[in-house]
Image: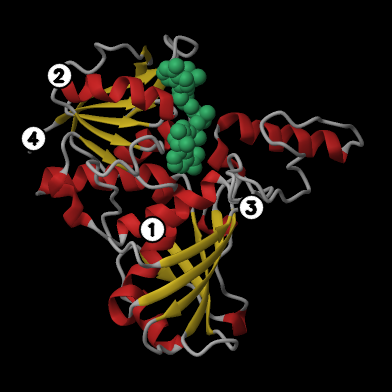
Amino acid sequence: MKEYVVAVVGATGVVGKEMIDTLESREFPIKRLIPLASERSAGSTISFNEKSIRVEELTESSFEGVDFALFSAGGSISEKYAPFAVKSGCIVIDNTSHFRMDPTVPLVVPEVNPGALKDHKGIIANPNCSTAQMVVALKPIYDAVGIERVVVSTYQSVSGAGKSALEELENQSRVNLSGGNYPPSVFTHPIAFNVIPQIDSFLESGYTKEEMKMIQETQKILNDPAIRVTATAVRVPVFVGHSESINIQTKQKITAQKVRELLENAPGVEVMDAPENFEYPTPRSAAGQDAVFVGRIREDVSIENGIELWCVCDNLRKGAALNAVQIAEYLIQS
Ligand SMILES: NC(=O)c1ccc[n+]([C@@H]2O[C@H](COP(=O)([O-])OP(=O)(O)OC[C@H]3O[C@@H](n4cnc5c(N)ncnc54)[C@H](OP(=O)(O)O)[C@@H]3O)[C@@H](O)[C@H]2O)c1
């Protein structure tokens, strides 16, 4: 079997580490792994397939001889360095928002729109974590009965904001519990014992950028600019795992039982829906898992064609690293 040279840009971050773990656990055929980060982390080591590998500083010439580069070091880094990677003949799978809405760049969730991969010109974008899990759950319903409108409210974990956010929640919780004050620096308000209805910055419309990403990326992935989506994105004091309350207005009537059956047979989805036994997904049960978990499936009593569901996923896996590695797997298999 052919083996590939793979670079991970942002290898010391929460997503980068998860990418390296995912490449290892899924036995991606790797000839050489090149972990890249800023000069701050250059020289430190990461562990891959029981070997210790030195982290290198990202430079314009980091991509010579590289087959795949998985980027997760922020939008400005992708903007600057992805073109050098492409020039070196490398395929870039980008986790940042930088290229997602570029019409020449496919935005791909392999369970939903793998066909878009054939049009890539060297860069493929990974969607926002909240969008990725939502479209995996929406797709079977979309295909069966059509979707008119989606109203989603998210409950997003702090790992979605990177390693400094994880440290802030941990330290702030500890200090608050012992009666002290720990001023926020990553978030605009204390995140410990709190809920913050703001993810990313506000736009003139009153929506946040995160909410607009969910709207626009869903339309792009489903290739349906007419699908109406509205979102409220909320940060909650959970370490890993994003939850979403999703209200779906379908084009044709569908029962909750039929939705359950569709989702039970859908790739990447695991239905966890036995309220009589208190079974429904939670971030703690989803963390460390690959699937998009769905529960609380019911018909909306307020409209004719409405479905309510609760969707939970490990944002670092299907929301980021796993989706990126699945894209690379898809490309080497096709
Ligand atoms: N967290 C999520 O759930 C998630 C999901 C989807 C997409 N994303 C996106 O992925 C990106 C990274 O997120 P994260 O949560 O992993 O952040 P993070 O934990 O803060 O990690 C950031 C990574 O980027 C590297 N980096 C920063 N500046 C750099 C530079 N100038 N040159 C090279 N490397 C540099 C850091 O290296 P050092 O150790 O050297 O600082 C670190 O490896 C963001 O764009 C984010 O929006 C995150």
Under circle 1, the secondary element is: helix
Comparing 304 with 73, the one in front is: 304
Q: In whole angstroms, how far apart are the C-alphas of marks 4 and 3?
A: 43 Å
Under circle 4, the secondary element is: loop
Task: Kindly identify the amino acid type of the residue bearing the numbered disc 3.
Answer: Val
Q: In whole angstroms, how far apart are the C-alphas of marks 3 and 1?
A: 18 Å
Residue pointed to by mark 1: 218
Image location (x, y in percent) of residue 238: 65, 49
Under circle 2, the secondary element is: loop
Image location (x, y in percent) of residue 11: 40, 26
Asked if the residue under mark 1 is in contact with the one under mark 3, i.e. CB atoms within 8 Å, the reply is no
Asked if the residue under mark 4 is in contact with the one under mark 2, i.e. CB atoms within 8 Å, the reply is no
Q: In whole angstroms, how far apart are the C-alphas of marks 1 and 4?
A: 34 Å
Image location (x, y in percent) of residue 17: 43, 32
Mark nearest the camera among 2 and 4 is: 2
Task: Kindly identify the amino acid type of the residue bearing the numbered disc 4.
Answer: Lys
Find residue 80 and report its image quarter: top left
